[in-house]
Amino acid sequence: MENNNLNKINNGEVAVAQEDTRKRGFFTRIIDGFYNFMDKTYNKVIVYGILIAFVLTLPLWASNYILQVAWNAMFYMLLGLGCNIIVGFTGMIDLGFAAKFAVGAYTSGILVHTFGWNFWLTLPIVVLVGMLAAVLIGGPALRLRSDYLAIVTLGFGEIVRIVARNLEITGSASGLSGIKRPYIFGVQLTRIWMWYYLFIVLVIIFVIASNRVKDSRFGRGLAYVREDEDAARAMGVNVVKYKMWAFIVGTVMGAVAGAFYVMQMAAVSPNSFQFTQSSNILLSVVLGGMGKVPGVMAGAAFFSIFPEIFREIGEYRMLFFGIALVLVMIFRPQGLWPDRRRR
């Protein structure tokens, strides 16, 4: 009698699992079909050619509002690619990534607004300050794992925001405004289409850097740490060292993105670096597919553009956005475009 009951329970669990697999399989087959389609070089050239032509010609026919949305999507791509080094490549949980681009934004903003520096000369200082911030938080924190590391990064994010809110040099709660925009070849970047093309270049640079990291010996070491930290340590991988360098690279990328962000906005305030901003960046990485560079870019674009499609319906647009996120997590839990090794 007892065996019959156990068999019924097991059969019920199998039936539920099969039904769940069937529901997920439809969406997975669609996305994986596109994935396999893109594996062919000929198809990839066609798709990328159409995409490049669309991106480069967008300012010729689009309104300033559309260009602003596109610029915002590319800005989230920059932040997502930086966060992906830490979260996707290494497997750490970072809930304070907004603090990383806050460091770059305030460093560049203060040097330009308060001390009259040329923006392009502030970029090396932004890189150095980003590295210093990564070492200060990463040194004592990267020996922690999972939830503990997440709490430390969350605390670091809040510390940076609160410090910026209370220091006079950062403009306190009101922040800095009226920051002079930079020049390129004698032309001041005052139009949105100028920033649009500049951020295209930045996205290309960040994509190349991310792929170089991923395909290097350093990137393979990060993959070992992500999959099994104890096994990586047993094989001779210096886990803390690899985590530290991943943290430094991700932080520097976030700081550089923040420096360009503050120049485009011509202002910066502590309200731009709240916890919700960090969660949005992390969500872009998870939604697109951790560890996959095109996936992170797709997740950032989805996260930035989707809410704008329903802007006319007001606050209800976030309801549709939330429903879309839930559907993606149910039917595509590994992300829209996951890394092949993690599928």
Image (spheres, rainbow, N blue to C red):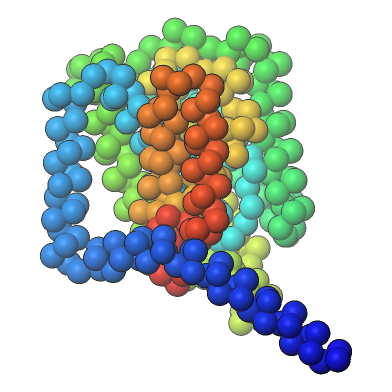
Query: Where's residue 110, x and y in %?
Result: 52, 18
Along the line of sight, the residue nearer the viewer: 212 or 145: 145
Along the line of sight, the residue nearer the viewer: 201 or 324: 324
Query: Where's residue 299, x and y in %?
Result: 43, 46
Along the line of sight, the residue nearer the viewer: 37 or 219: 37
Residue that lies at the very extreme toward the right in this rendered image: 2
- Whether residue 309 is visible here, answered yes or no, is yes
Residue visible at 30% across and 66% down in the picture: 33
Residue visible at 57% across and 17% down in the picture: 269
The answer to which quarter of the image holds residue 77 is top left
- Left or right of 91 on screen, residue 303: left
Query: Where's residue 69, x and y in %?
Result: 35, 27
- Whether residue 216 is visible here, answered yes or no, is no
Query: Where's residue 203, x and y in %?
Result: 33, 42
When the figure is inspected, residue 180 is found, relative to residue 15, above or below; the finding is above
- Left or right of 81 on screen, residue 251: right
Residue visible at 15% across and 24% down in the picture: 61
The answer to which quarter of the image holds residue 336 is bottom left
Q: Quadrant of the N terminus?
A: bottom right
- Left or right of 130 on screen, residue 92: right
Residue visible at 32% across and 31% down in the picture: 70
Residue that lies at the very extreme toward the front in this rendered image: 1
Q: What is the number of callouts on the image?
A: 0
When the figure is inspected, residue 11 is found, relative to residue 49, above or below; the finding is below
- Left or right of 153 on screen, residue 186: left
